[in-house]
Image (cartoon, rainbow, N blue to C red):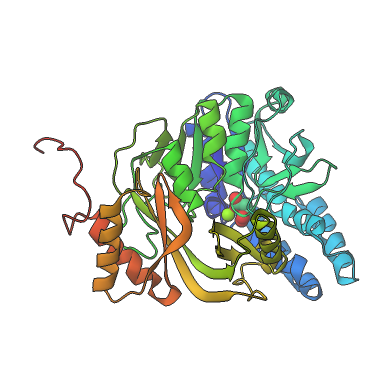
Amino acid sequence: MLKFGGAALKDGPAVALAARIVRERGGERPLVVASAHQGVTDLLERAAREAAAGERLWDELRIRHRTILRQLGLPGDLLDPQLRDLHAILGDLARGGPADRRCRDFVLSFGERMSARVLAAALRREGMAATAQDAFDLDLVHEAEEDGGAVGPPPPRVGEALARMPGVAVVTGFLAQDRAGNVVTLGRNGSDLSAAWFAEAIGAEEIQLWKSVAGVHTADPALVPAARTLPALSFEEAAELSALGAAVLHPGTAEPARRAGIPIRVLSVAAPADPGTRIDVRPSAPGPLALAHRAAVSLWRLPLDPGFRRGEELARILEAARTAGAAPWLVEASAGEAALVLRAGRAAGGAPPPPPARGELVAGLAAIGVVGEGAGADETLAAGVERTLAAAGVEMRWAPGGRSPRGRVLLVPTPRLGEALRRLHAALLEGACEGIVSPAPAAGPS
Ligand code: ASP
Ligand code: MG
């Protein structure tokens, strides 16, 4: 099973390369999952939100896809049915049609519908029989959640349907149907999750996630130049990293793979021969492994009724955050106080969460997750983090509810995020300041 992310399908030459990779690396009967071409989901999201701009954005989308077809030497009208349907729904929206969640997901679905057809056509040009398949026409039901969430095991009929398809099935990532049969999305970057889900459905040998970056890194290489590729991770470590904000994997991805015992490989189209990162069942060595981050969160503290209705009040608080367009991410409740780390909810379209009606809100924060076996309980590690940031003059605090067996989250002012990440990376992951972490068992002379 091979999944290609948006950056790995960004233009005609990228799609042609993906088609060659399928032929060379896909084994006898590859199953392929496609993301929308890079940037297309963002354009669709804007088109769904700014109905008045729909016509202009549709034009942009049409030109973008026609260009890719031309670069590949494919028929210029290949995507006309999808472009026509998209035009119709955007027209409905501009005339005041319902701009609800269902409609938004429907609009977003056109990105993958089109890229899967383009990739299938490119595979046929490579001489492989290939068919595009819309995931929402398979019997795969997902109850949409804020962040895509987790998915249960796919019913056997999904695997059977895929097995019956002639040639290479190129399935749309990111999409499923809800119980009522509507198209739903799995949350941004959800194609990773689709890939793991379909791999489980067909009992794939391996899940290859083809991206434009070389594997999972010790930190975001865009912010930390010294970050390096991690050769191997356990499913649990990968899940923790993505849960704490590492953008390289959708947070739900590791679970279906772990459940089905299928190893994941994160590979780069820029260097297809590189081994990338392997995610598999493996013992974890204690100590810090990587840093994850989220650039825009807020901390909300408010008094909590110490009485026996604390749970109910907490439920109301969570609901209030959601209605205000914020997603409660980390939560801690004590007898007298609730503390929440909020991030922008789906309705807010990536904007920072708005101020709540009561309590105290600190906005403009970034969250850093220190990930590694035992990180939540390792006080030596915590002291090292505090010392490192104090030495750099970066104000920090531990995030409420931010401790887990494999991670510990801290908050810093967003403008200091890059520096904090670089300092912590140097101290914890480059071996520059020995003594911060409890030393790992001696590995023998090297
Ligand atoms: N196209 C979707 C997105 O950009 C899903 C994905 O790329 O995995 O979020
Ligand atoms: Mg993407």
Toward the viewer: 223 or 73? 223
Give the answer, above or below, for where 245 lies relative to 274.
Answer: below
Q: Residue at x 76, y 41 (%)?
A: 136
256 lies left or right of 103: left
Toward the viewer: 253 or 145? 145
Whole-percent x and y of residue 226? Answer: 28, 60
Whole-percent x and y of residue 68? Answer: 63, 56
Q: Residue at x 82, y 51 (%)?
A: 81
Whole-percent x and y of residue 298? Answer: 54, 70
Look at the image and tell me in which quarter the C terminus lies. top left
Toward the viewer: 62 or 380? 380
Look at the image and tell me in which quarter the N terminus lies. top right
For residue 322, say whether it is visible. yes
Give the answer, above or below, for where 60 lies relative to 237.
Answer: below
Give the answer, above or below, for where 412 lies relative to 166.
Answer: below
Say which quarter of the image contains residue 230: top left
Whole-percent x and y of residue 25? Answer: 48, 33
Give the answer, above or below, for where 202 lies relative to 234.
Answer: above
271 lies left or right of 93: left
24 lies left or right of 396: right
For residue 127, say whether it is visible. no
Residue that lies at the very extreme toward the front in this rendered image: 307
Residue that lies at the very extreme toward the left in this rendered image: 445
Say which quarter of the image contains residue 431: bottom left
